[in-house]
């Protein structure tokens, strides 16, 4: 489980770049994992750039709720939303990769009630999410990826 001090942004970017590289080198066999009990899963969100129109592939942690996949637009507690969430707000149809499988999804922001219900699952998997929220004035968005 992730917890403790938040590393500098350059360290997080480097770690996620390594993560993406391993996933690509192994054809998706290593790089994503399904959530279990207290552990968050990892997936890749493939969105369309809101200005470029180009595909963008970003790794994120997730939990499952029925058929939906749920992620948090934390951006490591930065003052702005992550680019992938800005892209999904502009163009909500996307896809995800999990353990070599690709699924078509449609993104939407969780309602306040959904956010209150889903947030504890992320904190159980990683107390760092509370640190991210404490380090920014913006409310971190919980994003629901519904099958389409």
Image: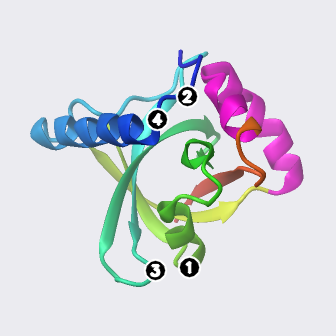
Residue denoted by label 1: 90
**1 w.r.t. 65: above or below:** above
Q: Are marks 3 and 2 in contact (CB under 8 Å)?
A: no
Give the CA distance from mark 1 to mark 2: 29 Å
Where does the magenta region start and end? 111-133
Q: Are marks 3 and 1 in contact (CB under 8 Å)?
A: yes
Chief SS of the magenta region = helix
Closer to the camera in the image, 136 or 105: 136
Residue denoted by label 3: 50
Asked whether 122 falls inside the magenta stretch, the response is yes
Secondary structure beneath label 3: loop
Give the CA distance from mark 2 to mark 4: 7 Å
Q: How many marks?
A: 4
Q: Residue at x 55, y 62 (%)?
A: 85
**130 w.r.t. 4: above or below:** below
Q: Nearer the viewer, mark 1 or mark 4?
A: 4
The numbered mark, 3 or 2, whose residue comes first in the sequence reads 2
Secondary structure beneath label 1: helix
Residue denoted by label 2: 6
């Amino acid at each position: 489980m992730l917890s403790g001090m938040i590393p500098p942004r350059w360290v997080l970017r480097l770690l996620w770049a390594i993560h993406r590289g391993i996933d690509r080198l192994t054809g998706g066999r290593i790089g994503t994992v399904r959530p279990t009990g207290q552990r968050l899963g990892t997936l890749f969100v493939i969105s369309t750039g809101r200005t470029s129109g180009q595909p963008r592939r970003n790794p994120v942690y997730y939990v499952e709720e029925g058929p939906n996949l749920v992620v948090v637009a934390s951006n490591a507690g930065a003052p702005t939303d992550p680019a992938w969430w800005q892209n999904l707000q502009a163009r909500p149809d996307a896809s995800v990769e999990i353990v070599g499988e690709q699924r078509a999804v449609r993104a939407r922001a969780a309602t306040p009630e959904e956010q209150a219900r889903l947030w504890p699952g992320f904190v159980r998997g990683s107390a760092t999410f509370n640190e991210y929220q404490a380090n920014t004035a913006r409310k971190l968005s919980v994003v629901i990826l519904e099958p389409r």
